[in-house]
Amino acid sequence: MVTKAYGAYAGDKPLEPIDIERRQPGPNDVQIEIAYCGVCHSDLHQVRSEWGGTIYPCVPGHEIVGHVSAVGSEVTKFKVGDTVGVGCMVDSCQRCISCDDGEEQYCEHGFTGTYNFPTQDAPGHTLGGYSQRIVVRDRFVLKVSHPAEQLAAVAPLLCAGITTYSPLRHWNVGPGKKVGIVGIGGLGHMGIKLAHAMGAHTVAFTTSESKREDAKALGAEGVIVTRNPEEMEAHAGSFDFILNTVAASHDLDAYTRLLKRNGTMTLVGVPEHPHPTPDFSSLIFKRRSIAGSLIGGIAETQEMLDFCAEKGIVADIEMIPVQKIDEAYERMQKSDVRYRFVIDSASLAA
Ligand code: NAP
Ligand code: ZN
C-alpha cells in the first residue's frame, strides 16, 4: 500500500517527502495508522550517517503511536481501533536464548530495527515512523492504556522511556539509592521522571544552566551543572548508580569519580566519536563499573508503558509538523529540546 513518508536520500541532504510501500498484512501482522512519532537523537545520528552504514532512502522514526486499521487472520491480541505503540524493533529470531528470555534487543541473530535494517519488504530495508502507516508483526506491537489526550506525549516512551527504564530496573534503582541522570534531553528527562517514580534520590547532571529549574520540576532532588567543578566535587564517591544519556563524546572520569564503592555508571548514549579512554585506576580502587544498555525487551516495554500509565507519566513534548524536521534536528544538536520533539503525523497529508 502506498504510504506518504518523510526521509532522506543522502546524509548531507534535507529530509523530503517520499512515497513508500507498506506490505499487505500477513496472518500475524498488525497494520497501524500512525498518529504521532517521537524524534530520537538516534534518528539524527542515522539519517546523517554519523554512525556509518546508513541505507538510503532512510525514513527514521521509532517512537510510534497510532491506531490499528487491520489485523491478520491469526492475530488475537489486537483488533481494529486499538491504540498501540511500536518502538525500536519490529522483529527478532524468536528462538535464541535472548529472545527466550524476553530480551529481543540482544537477539543472538540480530533483531530487526524499525528502520535501516534488512527486510523482505521493498526496498529491502526497514522504513520507520516518519510515515502515515506501518505494518508490524503482532509480537512487536505494544498496548497503550494512557488517556487518549496524552497520546502524543506517550510516543517518546517507546524509545526514550524504555531505554532509561530498563537499566534503572536492571541495576535495582529504588528507595534508598542515590541515582544520577546525565544529560537532560529526550532520554535524560525520562530517566529523571522514572528514577524519581521508582523512589530513588535522583540527581540530574546538565551542561545547561537554563535547565536547572526544569530538572527539579521533572523530579530531581538535586541538579549539578557539570561546568562547575565545585558542584561536581561536592558529590564525590556518593552515587550508587549513574545513567549517562549524553549524545556526544566526553570525559567519563568526571562521573566515575562520583560513584561509591561498587557503583555503576551505565552508558546509553551512542556518540558519533568515541569517548576518551577512561581512567581504569578509578574503577579498580573502588570496584566501580562502566556498563552499557540497549533499549529493552518487548515484555519490559509493555511493563514500562503500564507503569507510566498507572503513575501518570508521559514525556514533555514539543509538537511539530514533519516539514520542520530539519529545524528540529538543528535544535537537538544544540541541546535545545524541551524535551522531545514529536511529529504530528497528520502533517504528512499536507
Ligand atoms: P538528546 O535529546 O539530544 O539529549 C542529549 C543530551 O545530552 C542533551 O540534551 C544535553 O543535555 C546532553 N549533551 C549533548 N551534547 C553534550 C556534550 N557535548 N557534552 C555534555 N552533554 C551533552 O538525545 P537523546 O534522544 O536523549 O539520545 C541520547 C543518546 O542516546 C544519543 O546518542 C542516542 O543515539 C542514544 N540512544 C541510545 C539508545 C540505547 O538503546 N542505548 C536508545 C536511544 C537513544 P544537557 O543540556 O542537559 O547537558
Ligand atoms: Zn531512539
Image (cartoon, rainbow, N blue to C red):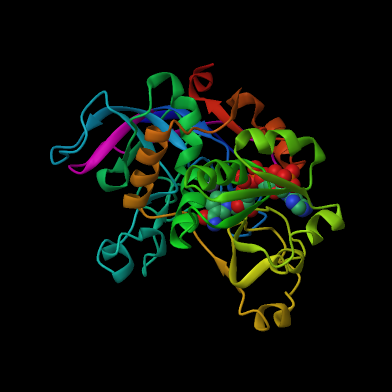
> Residue 319: x and y, percent?
59, 24
Who is closer to the viewer here, 335 or 169?
A: 169
> Residue 199: x and y, percent?
49, 47
Q: Is residue 172 above or below residue 9?
A: below
| Residue that lies at the very extreme toward the front in this rendered image | 176
Asked whether residue 19 appears in the rendered view, the answer is no
> Residue 240: x and y, percent?
58, 63
Left or right side of 87 for 252 = right
Task: State which quadrant residue 218 falls in.
Answer: top right
Does 50 appear in magenta? no
| Residue at (64, 33) in percent of width and height | 217
Quadrant the C terminus occupies: top right
| Residue at (45, 23) in percent of width and height | 150
Q: Which residues are magenta?
A: 12-33
Does 20 appear in magenta? yes
Left or right side of 81 for 274 = right
Who is closer to the viewer here, 59 or 76?
A: 76
Who is closer to the viewer here, 71 or 292?
A: 292
Left or right side of 330 for 83 = left
